[in-house]
Image (spheres, rainbow, N blue to C red):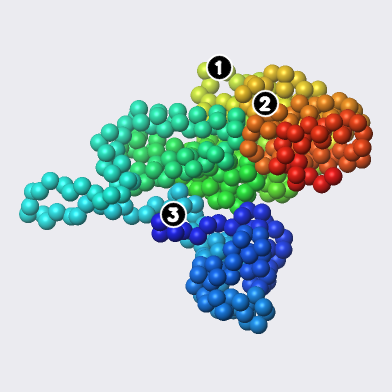
Amino acid sequence: MPDADRPQELPARLLTDPEMINACRMRDFARVFRLVKTRAGIYPSMIARRCELTPSRVGEVIAGRRQLLHMDVIERIADGLRIPGHMLGLARRPWETPQALAVTDREMPPEREPERHEPASLPGPDVDSILALATRTSLNGATLEAFRSSIEDYWRRDDQHGGEALRPAIVGQLRYVVGLLKEGRPPSIQNGLYGIAAELARLTGWTYFDARQYHQARAYFTEALQLAKEIDDRQFMANVLACMSLQATYQDKPVDSLALVSAAQDQARSAPGSTPRVLSMLSMREAFAHATLGNRDATTRAIGEAHRQFEQIQASDPDPSWVTYFDEPKLIVDTGIAHGRLGEAATAEPLIADALRREAPTNQRGRAFHTFWLARTQLDQGKLDQACHTATQALEPASAVASERVSGHLREFYDQLAPYRQEPVALAFEARLRELMPPVSGSLHP
């Protein structure tokens, strides 16, 4: 199906809304259709067309005069409205595999009759086929390096601006690379393509995670795992599982977070040549999970292991490119955040402040996160003036990056300010907030 004709996904906020979840679980399609209309702007006539129902039948369902019980109809509703199968008690729908990774058969040149020796026909007007034809003779190690260089650039721009605007380009490149995997190539090139596709899938998942669109993020992270498994890249599988662990922490699923990071550590330990930096990063993710569970002793042990591994890092270590971000300031700030999650604000504050002084100014999202964390630890200690001043400093980098996670940290701090909302410093912070981030401030409740 051409992209223009493919049904659009429902907004993530609707798919994660408890009312929608309950309506789907009960298969109460009157409520489902009403929610789709009011929250997604998909009107009954559009519902009918997308689900292959008559408009009158949809109207009867909404009015409560008809129920939809047949499984084939329920499947059409899931597919037409892009409701994930598990929400309706169905198996995973075919379209739930990210479209970027759903490899379709390309239009190929007509087959030549064996007895003739005519030149190969050119493919039809299909861009992927044309590119694939050209690449069959030119793809080499330099091409792989060009892909890797573009991925590094995507990550750099993601830190500076957020991934929302980058996602179409990333998904387009992912689709192209996955298409290349269908063609026979030397093992070194094929394995390199698998690694690049895995990294692009992880990056796509990360952009959805940063936008708090968790269902889509998990789908891409899962595809990244599958691609890395094809070449038995256990270190990268550990990296993806660590991303999924962090997402589970944000979803307030600390038990899942701990299980995922434990699996990540198992993968890394079984991989030949796992570096101390990788193991240090994974131990810090373990500390986050324990801290969210409130396990003080386990958090302390995991932090200690992270620092022990970090002390063993050598300049000659063959670190994968995806872990080089985990430098000393990152170790320190994550240590502070872990203590902050445990409620140990006095311990957390100087660590986060020290890391902020050493962080690269170009990482706008990271600086916004960490500055809001610093403000929260200061407020936890009753330092209202200092906390508001710190949070005001965070607004500038926060306004420069499109990130729902940044907005979430801002909302958490704003909620903490509730008892002090009429204090002059809190009023000044709110005024600056509304000046720099009006879309976010408009969603905050005074």
Residue 71 percent coordinates (x, y) = 54, 75
The numbered disc on residue 315 is 1
Q: Nearer the viewer, mark 2 or mark 1?
A: 2
Residue 8 percent coordinates (x, y) = 53, 57
Q: Quadrant of residue 436?
A: top right
Q: Quadrant of residue 34?
A: bottom right
What amino acid type is highlighted by mark number 1?
Answer: Ala
Q: Nearer the viewer, mark 1 or mark 3?
A: 3
What amino acid type is highlighted by mark number 3?
Answer: Asp
What amino acid type is highlighted by mark number 2?
Answer: Lys
> Is residue 110 left or right of 295 when viewed as pictured?
left
Compute the Cα span from label 1 to label 3. Answer: 47 Å
Q: Name the image quarter holding the C terminus.
A: top right
Camera sees residue 227: yes
Mark 3 lies on residue = 3
Q: Name the image quarter holding the N terminus.
A: bottom left
- Which of these two is toward me, 422 or 419? 422
Give the residue displayed 69% in from the left and 18% down from the top. 358
Mark 1 or mark 3: whose residue is earlier in sequence? 3
